[in-house]
Image (cartoon, helix red, strand yellow):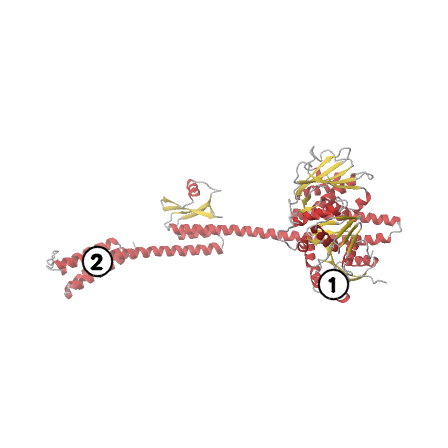
Amino acid sequence: MTADRWLRSVGPWLIAIGGTALVTALGRELDMNPSTAGFLFLIVVLVSSLRGGLLVAMVASVIATLSYNFFFFPPLHTLSISEPANWVALAAFLVTSVIVNRLVIDARVAAERADQRRNELETLYALSIELFTAGAVGDATERALKLLGAKSSSLAFFDAQSTPELEHLQRSGEPLELPSPDGRDVYLPLFLGGKVTGALIARGTDASLPALVSASRLIGLALEREKFLEENAHVQALRESETLKTSLLRAISHDLTTPLTAITIHTEGLRRKAERDAELKDSVSGIAGETSRLRRRIDNLLAMARLEAGKAKPRREPTPPADLFRAVRENLPLVFGARQILVHVEGDCPDANVDPFLALEILVNLIENAHRVSPPETAIELRARTHPLDPNQVRIEVLDRGPGMPPGVADADGNLLAGATSDVAQRGLGLEIARTFAAANGGSLGITPRPGGGTIARIDVPAALLPESEPA
Amino acid sequence: MTIAPLMLVVDDDPAIRESLGRELEASGYTTVLASDGLAGVHAFQTHAPDLVLTDLSMPRSDGFELIAAIRATSNTPILVLSVRGNDADKIRALDLGADDFVTKPFSVGELLARVRSQLRRHSGTPPTVLAFDDLRIDLERRRVVQGGREIRLTPTEYSLLELLATNAGKPMFTDHIIARVWRDAPGTTADTVRVHMVALRKKIEPEPSSPRYIVTEPWVGYRFIAEPVADGLQ
């Protein structure tokens, strides 16, 4: 035992006994009256309470009361009291000393608790600073819980671990305190995203429950923050990637379209000058035709790229099929000039609820395919009507008199088979593009044999039905 | 002798700018060329052209700034050369005051038709009768005759037809149609316009499968596409 500890344990007893002896001696020597001596004895009891525990204080009270009686109340040097008034004084002294003891000891306990709270608050504050600035949740947690008196600590998540204690915590959501050889183990709920997802386990701690609960809340918040920062970094990376895709698509679109525009204008100038030269005129027509095909392919591929990059969300709006057919005519002047195209829109056919640009691309691709495989003297037919089985859909069809689809491209119901459209040699990219764009419009593409020979390519897309009545 | 209309062509790509200038001159127009929006504004102030053809994406000063600068002082028709896929840009240009657009790569024939349409709309006093192929619209008497036979239109249908036909060739925003025909009456929506447009098209289109007069303009509204029979420049 060190001198300091010895002094702390023996000191209060010395004060109680020595102080009483000293007051007695002094009182006798100075011939004090009982009132003065009583105050001095009370001071001894007070100091004993401040320095020692309840036992020291009570012993000091008893010794002081006995000394007070023995040396200061007549008859002196006896433990009897002759005058009733002195009984009252002695009783008052005893009661006062006991009350003083009680008050002093309560104040001491409260001060010690306040001191513990202060330490816990300081620890929690340091933990919050560390968690929300440094960001290393695991290390900061361990350090903080050690400061809160825990022998060890750990984090456990319900989706990774399962013990009876964790299961209880998951069910109740309330802290769980269990006795342990080191004091007590505390399982604290860990809130993430508004629900209990795991536990903070503090082993062998004597810290108050409110402080431990606060620590677990702080750690939960820090974990949420860590997760949010990770997600934010991911979103930021995605956003930058999207911006890059948009810029690239814009640049490619501009860089490919500009020379094509110049070639188209030059070709038309050349065509004007070649009016009187049949051979040159044919060559110019060939250049114009190939330029137009190239333009279509670039448009298709860019549209596919935009869809896949998520940059071109289909913008569907009511679109009359007749307007789509007209737009096809404007986009395929060479096809429409080279063969008969029959167009029929049934009178009650509703508008299609489609992205007009994507719907146009579907038709252009299907008509180009039909044109490529059909004998020159045969017509291509374009039809639009209400879907025969579903009045909420529009059916648009492209009918040709070509050789028909090779086996294995579509099933008996006309649905394209997986991988069929990848046969570039058979129908080119067109079918794949048409299928992708039809799906993007909330519709479908099917291919069926045409009675009498040829193929029917049908697109079923949502209808934009007219409201029942509108104000005039 | 009539003076050839002057076209201001603004495009940062010299191949397009110069070849377009040549084709316009071959079609009887005179041209002034500029390589960006700033040069376009300067050329516009210096030459006072009859029509402006402008690209949108240009360095230094783009087509939007040019349109805004011209619209601050003038009603000269502006035709935008837009790129497919940039529909938001096209609509923004129309919002700023552009009159029409053609999508690159365009055919010269299509461009010349749009140019003629714009020049016609901006020339002379407004006519009292509009004649298109077999359709005649008497604006004073509010009568519509097709193939010698009068077509009975409701007041709303007539107002729609008059608005579109007097702006023939120009894409008309649905919002603008609602403001002009319905005077922004509460509850009027794009569907209201669509219902009446379907009825109107059934009455005036001789072959509904192949519209000759009115078509929808994707993401904008509608356009009257027929050209008046008394045409000037070819």
**Mark 2: which secondary structure?**
helix
Q: Compared with residue A459, is residue B127 higher up or lower down, i.e. above or below?
A: below
Residue in the foreground of this view, choosing between A371 and B70: B70
For label 1, the SS is helix
Is residue A58 toward the left or the right of residue B64 in the image?
Answer: left
Q: Residues within 10 Å of mark 1 (few under 14, many from 20)?
A: many
Q: Amino acid at mark 2?
A: Thr
The residue drawn where x is 50% and y is 52% is A225
Direction from residue A287 to residue A385 in the image, left or right:
left
Tell me where residue A133 appears, x and y as whole percent. 49, 56
Q: CA distance from mark 2 to mark 1?
A: 104 Å
Discs 2 and 1 share one subunit = no
Question: Which of the 4 image quarters holds residue B22?
Answer: bottom right
Residue A64 visible to an observer of this rendering: no
The subunit carrying tag 1 is B
Comparing A51 with A398, the one in front is A398
Task: Give the labeled residue for mark 2.
Answer: A96
Q: Which chain does the residue under circle 2 lie in?
A: A
Give coordinates of residue A79: x percent, y percent: 13, 56
**Image disc number at residue B40:** 1
Q: Residue furthest front?
A: B141
